[in-house]
Amino acid sequence: MRRVHIWHRLVALLSILAVPVDASAQTAGDAAASPRASSPDWGTGIAIVAIILLLVIAIGVVAKLYDVNRRRKEENAALQSLLSDALLLERSIVGLPVAPFVSQSVWPHSPLVIAVRGSVPTLELRDAVMRLVEQEAFRRHPGARTEDRLQVDPRIGQDRVRSTTR
């Protein structure tokens, strides 16, 4: 609803700029002969005010977009931190090189995308990691989409066994 009102105001301002303005060149010798040359030209003043108003509106729109983008990045960083903490608290996943990466487009209703990257030793751990990330993400953002970019590498499991037996 709010966008419609702004567009109606912009159309009204643009129609003011579209009206032709009667402009005449003023010279020093011609000023005394023509009484119209010394009269104020209202069309030019209105055009200047309209241009300044359009610039102020454009600056406001850019500032609003910047603020929305900044807030969205902060929310994404908070969710990424929450997901990383959840992965660190899960005993079966501790020590695995797995990390979630959260991204989202600037568009208002775009879905949140969580890409889980890293390596796990078994398919069961891969499913456990994805299930945990989906559960945690669904609690905060029900429309979030998860992308599985995990690689199954059995050698990682061997390194974990050696490091825990020392």
Image (cartoon, helix red, strand yellow):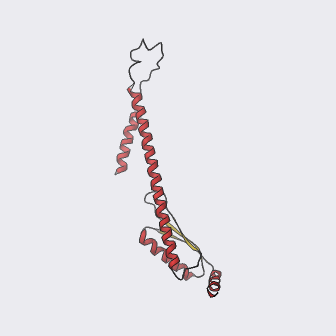
Residue furthest bottom as drawn? 165
Residue located at (58% from left, 82% from top): 122
Instruction: State how many labels appear.
Output: 0
- Across and down, in percent, residue 115 comes to 53, 69
Residue located at (43% from left, 72% from top): 138
State which quadrant residue 16 falls in.
top left
Judging depth in this view, the residue of 40 and 109 nearest the camera is 40
- Across and down, in percent, residue 50 comes to 41, 35
- Across and down, in percent, residue 98 comes to 57, 74
Residue located at (45% from left, 40% from top): 55
Q: Is residue 78 above or below residue 24?
A: below
Residue located at (45% from left, 61% from top): 110
Q: Is residue 103 visible?
A: yes
Q: Quadrant of the C terminus?
A: bottom right
Judging depth in this view, the residue of 21 and 60 nearest the camera is 60
Q: Is residue 20 visible?
A: no
State which quadrant residue 57 falls in.
top left
- Across and down, in percent, residue 159 comes to 65, 82
Q: Is residue 143 left or right of residue 159?
A: left
Q: Is residue 142 above or below residue 161?
A: above
Q: Is residue 142 left or right of residue 156?
A: left
